Amino acid sequence: MADVVLTADRTLMSNYRGKEFLGFASTVPPNVVPDWFFERLFFPYVRERGGLPLEAPYGLRKIEAKLLEGGFDVVTVRPDRLKRWLRGARALGVHAMDPFGVGPSSSTFSRLLKSGEPYLVKHFKAIFQSPEVRRAKADGLRIIVGGPGAWQFRYWPEAQEELGIDCVIDGEAELVLVDLFRRAIEGGELPRFLEVPPSMAPSLDDIPEIRNPSINGLIEIGRGCPRGCAFCSVTLRPLRWYPLEKIDRELRVNSEGGVDGCILHGEDVLLYGARGVIPEGDKVLALHRLAKSRARGLGWSHASMAAIAAAPKLMEELSEIIIDGDQRWWGAEIGIETGSPELAAKVMPAKARPFKPEEWPEVVKSAAGIMADCGLVPACTLITGLPEETEDDVIKTIELIEDLKWFKSLIVPLFFVPMGRLKGEDWFKAEQMTASQIELFLICLRHDLRWAKAFMDDYLKGKPYAPLLKPLYKIVIWATERRARKEGALLKAPGEGVRPPIEATAPRRC
């Protein structure tokens, strides 16, 4: 048996039936749909071979690779297999995405549906509350938690004690990981909460390449972001782009492991290889030709409205590479954040570059037109409750979202969370919402419920199991809509029930 066992909760140990967007379903709280039914539809467990998952979260695969590089006997497993693998293990590493449900869509859906903790919180806690983990802990097991959601333990330190977690690592951990796990195995002292500063960010040589396949073929193309938004912690880290050779080695790991899709992960994929905010077309095209040669389906983790608006010709060329007989569209998460030029100038002035902050609403609408024409279907985010946000800022955001009714997308409003350069500010709470902010949430909810039905059609088209799953997914959407209406989160709108026209208001560009 291995000395080190790595795992993540059930909502992360899923490939979401090959459709990453379905992962958003793990951020909603249980509602009128039975849990077992909802879980099997949206985040069924990944398949296994020899008791090991064929895919695992990319962050866990990076940790696994670094520990293997350091000479550890390590294995990555599903949480429902811990009983077998914890026998004789000395340390358990757990990947945390949103352990307390205060991340982007989690806080939104919890507020609107009013029905308890999101699924991802429930399943994260279940790991530590399981009999096998409690037994192993009593026998001396050391538990280390890290991942994108590790920062949340700074605000809930008491939960660390309650869950039996010995150490939490927040930040890029490559330079400290081997030493921490060695101390854990040898019974040495561990820091309760270790925040790795940007000055300790690993170089490209320090970042290992994954040894086993990642969920849906996700691989990093770089780390860091040049835009410097005040509310984001990623911008505090140095910008590093992986060379194509490093990327190709990870692409091969996934393709040879039977994963036929790929998600390119970067804070702004269109800026691959660039030192500033202007896309360098040759580098971006070379990246996509390489990725598409190894994967049938291709998507992005993140992109920016400004980069898309600045490069319509590049987007057209990318569309020609990506859209083929194997796929008809691709997805990405993209931040709109606000519709107010004034607020954009205060908290994210570089997000509009190479355009000016005062042009931000037009940049968003132009990018939306380009995406619609090129086949990019995004999940967009907004932030409400920013420290300097005014009523006028909220109204301008509402006006922008109203202008995007035709745009095939998800638009998720988020409560402000103090991160990045705004880490010292107060959290925004649901009780502070003004009438305008509530209206913004309702507009987004109606937009998302409407387009969710179209997404289901796209996801299932051509699949042999579509006749069975399509009506089941639509039952879930209907049930969510019903619950939201019951809680007053969906207001009766004029003409509701009649599908409005969705002609693109932007000119064709691709």
Image: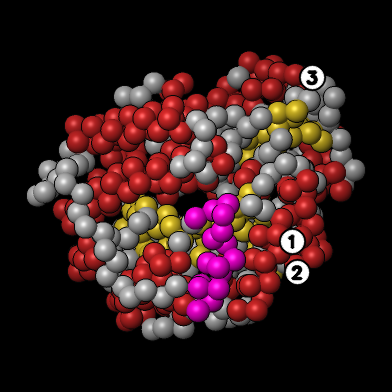
Quarter the N terminus occupies: top right
Residue positioned 49% across, 56% down in the render? 329
Amino acid on which disc 2 is placed: Pro
Q: Is residue 411 above or below residue 313?
A: above
Quick check: is 396 in the magenta stretch? no
Residue 193, visible in the rendered structure: no
Q: Position of residue 345 (x, y in %)?
A: 36, 77
Q: Which residue is mark 3?
A: 87
Amino acid on which disc 1 is placed: Ile
- Asked if labels 2 and 1 touch by Cβ distance under 8 angstroms, the answer is yes
Q: Main secondary structure of the magenta part?
A: helix
Residue positioned 12% across, 43% down in the render? 492
From the viewer's perspective, is 145 left or right of 466?
A: right
Q: Which residue is mark 2?
A: 243
Q: Which residues are magenta?
A: 313-328
Quarter the C terminus occupies: bottom left
